[in-house]
Image: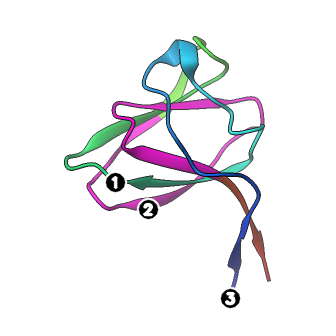
Amino acid sequence: MARTLCKGAEAACPTTTGAATSFSEATVVRLVNTHNGNHLVTVVETQSGTVVGSFTMPTGAVEYLEKNPTQCVFAANAGVLGSKVGFTA
């Protein structure tokens, strides 16, 4: 069973593409929606770059987002928190 390896401090996701973060060039980001309501999470190639994809996170949901190190993340609400993580056996 894989376990989560913390590799960075948890922080609020930026709420605009111009402030989007790579979470220190993470390849896996643990996201949790701590705010009431469903919120869109968007992955872009770079800050203010082309959209790679997006998904909606329901209240209380936890997702592990796999991405390229240079890709950046932002959310519709700062109640979506993210942290750079990895996995260990």
Could you tell me which quadrant the C terminus lies in?
bottom right
Question: Considering only vertical position in the picture, is 16 above or below 37?
Answer: above
Question: Left or right: where does residue 87 sit relative to residue 83?
Answer: right
Spot occupied by residue 85 in the image (x, y as percentages of width and height): 70, 59
Q: Residue at x 39, y 36 (%)?
A: 78
Spot occupied by residue 35 in the image (x, y as percentages of width and height): 28, 49
Residue 43: image quadrant is: top right
Spot occupied by residue 60 in the image (x, y as percentages of width and height): 31, 61
Q: Residue at x 36, y 43 (%)?
A: 79
Dot 1 crowding, Cα within 10 Å, few <14, some 14–19, many 20+: some
Question: Which residue is label 3 attached to?
Answer: 1
Mark in the foreground, 2 or 1: 1
Question: Left or right: where does residue 54 sit relative to residue 43?
Answer: left
**Dot 2 lies on which element?**
strand
Which contiguous range is marked in magenta?
A: 54-83
**Dot 3 lies on which element?**
loop
Count the numbered circles shown. 3
Question: Which residue is label 2 attached to?
Answer: 62
Residue sitting at the far bottom = 1
Question: Which residue is label 1 attached to?
Answer: 34
Q: Quick one: label 1 or label 3, which is nearer the N terminus?
A: 3
Amino acid identity at mark 3: Met
Question: Considering only vertical position in the picture, is 65 above or below 15?
Answer: below
